[in-house]
Image: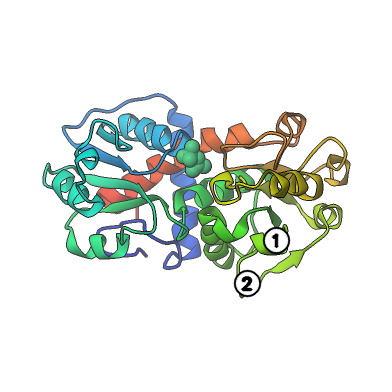
Amino acid sequence: MSTSLKNSLIHLRNFKKQDVIDLFERASFFEKQKNSFVKTDQTAALIFFEASTRTRMSFETASVRLGLHPMILSGKASSSLEKGESFEDTVLNIAALNPALLIIRTDDSLDLNRLEQRLALPILNAGWGTQGHPSQALLDAFTIWRKKGTLEKERVLIIGDVGHSRVAASHFELSKIMNYEVALCGPQNFMPTGTAHAAFSNLEEALGWATVAMALRVQNERHSKLATLTSYADKFGLNTKNKKFISQGTLIMHPGPINHGIEMDLAVMRDQRSVILEQVINGVYIRQALLERALNGGTR
Ligand code: CP
């Protein structure tokens, strides 16, 4: 079932379809539970070396709802990272405090696979460089599943900075397991090299194909030239002019955070087909299911 006997979550590639369905069913259960808190004497360590709003607070909420007390390291400020301590030493020292599990967001410099083999406790990937963001792909897929009743044969269009996107990397894995199609749309230099997925260069044509239109954040930190961003917004930004090419039943999604006026205008975010805030709501339930699975192997 899992990446290891500890039920860590590093990649999705080892999941089977039934594992994903089990997670969705547990997430649906947690949705019905809403805010019923339980109490344990365990802690969950949230180690966020990179910035986050949704993932960090969603895992924090999910931890509290499962009775895990969250211990949070968020960025460098006030931590010994400021004194030059390495990411790996930081993780090993936090692990020595004996949390029930580690939830880690990091850049590519930290090897989560190596840490997972070295440590006895489960590790949950909360966004790892360009490697993957499995809980995000799962919550996206759960949102589609809830709205459409299935993922089979859904046509998910991922628009934008796909080459730098860990969210896209996890959808490439999950789409094979859950049998949904993924196509890409964006400028050539934003596309991953050697992709097996169909790529559209024309956004209007691509939107006509899609049953889910998922825009990604243009990673400004990697594309700092204003000219690049302006030309991107003209050709690939979702806006009031091109949203008419999105069919009525198509879901509009974005993992967040959004650069308004670049990959998505406010009017598109507020469109009735947008499920962007539902993604955030569903993220807590999926993360509760992932935490439960990490703690006790889930329900199977
Ligand atoms: N979707 C996502 O990972 O958002 P944050 O960076 O705010 O966690």
Measured as percent of width and height from the top left, residue 194 is found at: 61, 75
Please state the horizontal and vertical placement of residue 127, each as a whole percent of the image: 43, 50
Which class describes the residues within 10 Å of circle 2: few (<14), some (14-19), or many (20+)? few
Q: Along the horizontal axis of the image, is 72 left or right of 54?
A: left
> What is the crowding at mark 1: few (fewer than 14 residues within 10 Å), some, or many (at least 20)?
many
Q: Residue at x 86, y 43 (%)?
A: 242
Q: Is residue 15 left or right of residue 77?
A: right
Residue at numbered disc 2: 195
Q: Is residue 29 visible?
A: no
Q: Is residue 56 above or below residue 121?
A: above
Name the amino acid, label 1.
Answer: Leu
Residue at image x 72%, y 43%? Answer: 251
Q: Residue at x 75, y 43 (%)?
A: 230
x, y (%) of residue 74?
32, 35
Q: Nearer the viewer, residue 292 or 173?
A: 173
Q: Which residue is mark 1?
A: 184
Q: Indicate the quadrant where residue 192 lies.
A: bottom right
Q: Please give the label number shown on residue 210.
A: none
Question: Is residue 166 visible to the viewer in this orientation of the structure?
Answer: yes
Mark 1–mark 2 Cα distance, whole angstroms, equals: 9 Å
CB within 8 Å, label 1 to label 2: yes
Lower sequence index among marks 1 and 2: 1
* 173, above or below 255, in the image: below
Report helix, strand or loop for mark 1: strand
**Apparent side of residue 134 relative to residue 157 in the rendered image (left or right):** left
Quadrant of the image containing the C terminus: bottom left
Q: Which quarter shows the N terminus? A: bottom left
Q: Is mark 1 within 8 Å of ligand 1?
A: no
Instruction: Classify residue 192 as left or right of residue 94.
Output: right
Q: Secondary structure at mark 2?
A: loop
Residue 121: image location, x then y, percent: 20, 53
Q: Which amino acid type is shown beneath numbered disc 2?
A: Thr
